[in-house]
Image: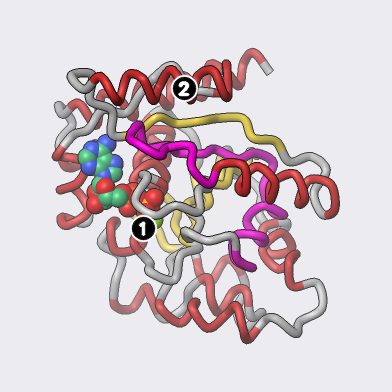
Amino acid sequence: MKIIALLNQKGGVGKTTSTVNIGAGLCKLGKKVLLIDLDPQANLTYSLGIQGHDLRKTIYELLKGQVDITDVIVEKDGLKVIPSSLDLSGAEIELSGTAGREFLLRESLSKLNNLDYILLDCPPSLSLLTLNSLVASNEVYIPVQTEFLALQGMSKLLQTVEIVKKRLNTGLEITGIIGTRYDSRKTLNKEVVQKVQSYFGAKLFKTLIRDNVSLAEAPSFGQDIFAYKPDSNGAEDYLKLCKEILKREKVD
Ligand SMILES: Nc1ncnc2c1ncn2[C@@H]1O[C@H](COP(=O)(O)OP(=O)(O)O)[C@@H](O)[C@H]1O
Ligand SMILES: [Mg+2]
């Protein structure tokens, strides 16, 4: 079971889009996948059209120890999802006095088996929720928008991962960098990809996710890209990325 945190403290770089569509793609390729929304903005939850009854029990109640993990998992087109809600924005303060507060998610996930991948959609901050994700994960993927300032803030991010690795989770590794919103017509985008490549080497996935309007539209229909526009560039790119992920797994 691989547990992967999609992390970048910058907002709008494609964490949620990548979590949803890598999850859906791996599911399409026959893997058993659980997605966890750890962002109080609950973008992933809404992107998949999860609402109403399904939001009575969320990651918030799970982290507070009020419910069992099996009670918070929602099924959505073959994908398993643990939704989030705005309540989660209070968790930071409410849990700050709890002993072992960085380990709450890891403990909950330890009760799960029978899954191939768990993908964690992190909030755009290096907060207690992000710490919980990093402590619970084996791997980190960093989505990077192939635009100006793509690497700004990167050293802080890498430092945070290193600290968690040293103190709380020795097995943690950054294993994948995902170039997002790529436009080959823009010289700047190409230059940024080269920069990211020279910084991260082989960790950068060969598959770049192109800028594609269908990817931005799909959430408003509560669908992943494969359900919304299976013929789009977005669907092509995320499926290719998933195949690359599975290929790397074989090499490991
Ligand atoms: N490859 C892409 N092409 C076009 N729009 C994208 C792409 N990836 C993400 N977006 C859009 O960009 C915005 C930010 O993406 P999102 O995944 O929510 O980022 P994050 O979770 O890092 O904040 C969203 O409106 C999303 O629909
Ligand atoms: Mg997001």
At a point 63% along the width and 80% down the height, the residue shown is: 64
Q: Which residues are magenta?
A: 127-153
Q: Give left or right: position of 189 versus 229.
A: right
Image quadrant in which you'd find residue 48: bottom left
At a point 62% along the width and 48% down the height, the residue shown is: 156
Location of residue 143 in the rendering, given as x and y in whole percent from the top left corner: 45, 38
Location of residue 14 in the rendering, given as x and y in whole percent from the top left corner: 36, 44
Dot 2 alpha-carbon crowd within 10 angstroms: few under 14, some 14 to 19, many 20 or more:
some
Residue receiving disc 1: 44
Against 33, is 182 above or below?
above
Residue receiving disc 2: 195
Q: Nearer the viewer, residue 172 or 151?
A: 151
Residue 79 seen by the camera: yes
Is residue 135 shown in magenta? yes
Is residue 152 shown in magenta? yes
At a point 68% along the width and 64% down the height, the residue shown is: 108
Mark 2 and mark 1: Cα distance apart in space = 29 Å
Q: Secondary structure at mark 1?
A: helix
Q: Give left or right: position of 100 versus 216.
A: right
Outermost top residue: 251
- Looking at the image, is mark 2 or mark 1 earlier in the sequence? 1
- Three-letter code, disc 1: Leu
Quadrant where the N terminus is found in the figure: top right
- Three-letter code, disc 2: Lys
Q: Tell me if label 2 and label 1 are in contact, CB under 8 Å.
A: no
